[in-house]
Amino acid sequence: MIEYRNVRVALLGGGTVGAQVARLLLEHKEEFASRVGASLELTGIAVRNLDAARSADLPKELFTTDAESLILGADIVIEVMGGLEPARSYILQAINSGADVVTANKALLATHGTELFEAAERVGAQLYFEAAVAGAIPIIRPLRESLAGDRVKRIMGIVNGTTNYILDKMDTEGASFDDALAVATELGYAEADPTADVDAFDAAQKASILASLAFHTTIPLESVYREGIREISGKTVELAKKAGYVVKLLAVCERVTDQDSGVEAVSARVYPALISREHPLAAVHKANNAVFVEAEAAGSLMFYGAGAGGPETASAVLGDLVSAARRHIIGGPGLGSSLEANIEMLPFSKIQTRYYIGLSVLDQKGVLANVANVFSDNNVSVEFVQQSVDSGVQGREATLIVGTHFAQESDLQLTVEKLSKLESVSAVDFFIRIED
Amino acid sequence: MIEYRNVRVALLGGGTVGAQVARLLLEHKEEFASRVGASLELTGIAVRNLDAARSADLPKELFTTDAESLILGADIVIEVMGGLEPARSYILQAINSGADVVTANKALLATHGTELFEAAERVGAQLYFEAAVAGAIPIIRPLRESLAGDRVKRIMGIVNGTTNYILDKMDTEGASFDDALAVATELGYAEADPTADVDAFDAAQKASILASLAFHTTIPLESVYREGIREISGKTVELAKKAGYVVKLLAVCERVTDQDSGVEAVSARVYPALISREHPLAAVHKANNAVFVEAEAAGSLMFYGAGAGGPETASAVLGDLVSAARRHIIGGPGLGSSLEANIEMLPFSKIQTRYYIGLSVLDQKGVLANVANVFSDNNVSVEFVQQSVDSGVQGREATLIVGTHFAQESDLQLTVEKLSKLESVSAVDFFIRIED
């Protein structure tokens, strides 16, 4: 049997994920060695401040503030420090010094992914990032490898645990958005400033990564349409529930045909949407994540699990580490990737969805006809109309719920705009897309 | 850019799966070339009978009955003919002539896996088999790679679509086993002779493969405990439903501690069991499959999708083919695998589960005490007892439902045996395990 020298692993970041990665690496040293065929030696943990408390009982001598020296001596660099800088510079340094890199940094990949992948390609290094999307759920590898012989048509993902926790609480307990957010913050699911989660910046980063992998093209973060969940009211959730739907923040990535040019394009977008309670994604509760994939031959697949958390993210990082280490000692192609497709992005205004719209209207003759005319004038076909219970008395306000057939986003937006200007409509209470 | 020569791919088997593999390979030739970095050339399709009808419109000149010559000229051999022989001999021939092999043959792997893997290891060839378990659902690669840095504690899988279809129909429509089987046969979900599915031979093969991968050890097929679903009555399903459970045929693979020796062991077993309706596996309907994995760091994960079907299985085969082809032109370690652990198997009699037992008893004084004594005499602790509605009149028969706490299988079996001999018990109607 060939004896290999140790594989030297440098860890950048000693926070929740970093501490778990270090702990598991040290605790399961023997198992890693037998799976890799060589020992994995943790050469150090780079942190900003040596005095900060660590969440695992790790040897003090492993910690250093000198990340650059640590990177220089490493075969594999694990980056779990987060943020754009200095993470980006450190990863470029690692790649250029010949190391493979494992990262959990979705913001960095969504923002500087192209630069990092090109740098890696130039020197033949690998960049692994299973932990960057949906925590421990293996989704990157299935997309890059298992489905490499198939053609992905569509992805719908619940990829942000915080917002799923909030929406699930609104759905199951009738909580308001503010109350659900308060509980999520108290339990540590939401950060003090919840913007990244609630306004869907985090989900948009993941959508950019998923769409790029699924469609073998580059989907820049800024071309992902993004809408958060702040506007979702308890009433919308309740009405949706009565109609057999549940509100989820969905990352939707799909192959579509541009209706004008007939050209194949892709769309990537993140927004709260209704899905049927029969859909497997409807059963994803609390802070869990799930990614639903439709492929030409494989049909419908779903990957489900915890989307975040220290040990969960560490599990994904360590899976990548084993792959990187095996490649390091034996060589080979690493994970598959290809960006050859270069498909164009469909503008958001051209996507086709269905709408579910709530209107406060004056309960008087002719209102329904006026409303119906606005829809048909703007090429939107109505599937159903429901009048709410508090209607019936002439002159009082009533609530009208309208569900549409598939229509183009620009037509739907124009319809909403025109509805809000109707004299007999006092307010457009909400509009939300329906996915299935 | 380096120009590689074609990768020559031989296909053994032209049935449902083989025809789909060939069709997709030919139709998506360009996409495969760009993902692999070289053209994949389908050199031929070996079949038994050239005149048999093919399910896709494939060039006649590709078909041959001379499998051995086809194998000799191949870089990669895809085996989708099924059965033990000549599949085993052909795969050994391919390995020994230096080809990598992609197979969907679970029966072969469960029966001759050790021989095939050893042969591959001797010459440094790779054996890919994503399609052998749960069709298009990527489960083999996540277990071999994504979770390689974690420790799997338990797997619960719905890995047979036919039985899930039958049990789902019994649950949702109140059908009897015979009626549900008849419909499954009519719709093509069940074969004319349903033994392999209904008596869980197919699920046991998959359990053997999953357990071997998850625990890095060899779990021979004959050490997997196997119980089919023929004995599941409509009444059992109905009573389970009322109690908040659903009956599923589960493949359970887990790390356990042998209570006698204190030694770590593994258990692999297949039987119909009750799971809570809140469990993600309970939402797996029709002929779908799902594998629920609990790992130390990753927590709970679930992989869901279609478990069978020509295109679905072809998708998994082609994902493996892309991996094999990339390895062929660039070299490298291939998929990770390690059988170093060599953990012992826990005898089935020592596993710990809960039981749900239905008894027909004479409705007379002292029956409950008699029954309770049998449980406590055999070290089984009772969690709840329910008396069914048709009881109450002295001397008439009543139904007693008993749920137990966790107990050892041998004690549970002894309890059932003793109960059946009680004078006041006219029949043990059913007993079924509870998993969660």
Image (tube, coloured by chain):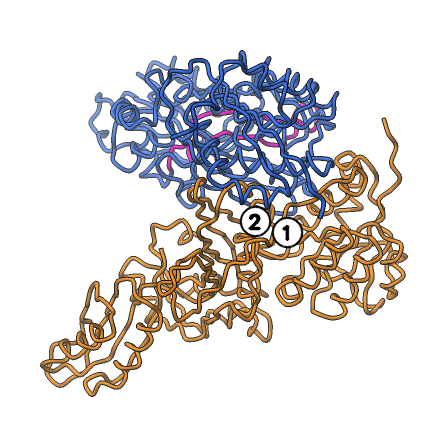
Chain colours: A orange, B blue
Image vertical order of residue A91 relative to residue B261, above or below: below
Span shown in magenta? B246-274
Q: Which chain carries label 2?
A: A
Q: What residue type is labelled 2?
A: Ile
Q: Which amino acid does label 1 sit on?
A: Glu
Does the CB distance between marks 1 and 2 fall below 8 Å? yes
Which of the pair B291/A27 is nearer the observer?
Answer: B291
Magenta span: predominant SS is: strand
Horizontal arrangement in the rendering, residue A296 relative to residue A425 (left or right): right
Horizontal arrangement in the rendering, residue A85 relative to residue B258 (left or right): right
| Residue B154 visible in the picture | no
Tell whether position B262 is magenta.
Answer: yes
Horizontal arrangement in the rendering, residue A333 relative to residue B304 (left or right): right
Image vertical order of residue B362 relative to residue A63, above or below: above
- Residue A225 drawn at (x, y percent): 48, 69
Image vertical order of residue B432 relative to residue B69, above or below: below
Residue beneath label 2, please? Answer: A139
Which of the pair A30/A260 is nearer the observer?
Answer: A260
Quadrant of the rendered image containing residue A374:
bottom left
The quadrant of the picture occupied by the C terminus of chain A is bottom left
Which of the pair B322/A424 is nearer the observer?
Answer: B322
- Residue B206 drawn at (x, y percent): 52, 26
Numbered mark located on residue A130 in the image: 1
Classify mark 2: helix, strand or loop.
Answer: loop
Q: Which chain carries label 1?
A: A
Numbered mark located on residue B188 in the image: none
Disc 2 crowd rating (10 Å Cα; few below 14, some 14-19, many 20+) is: many
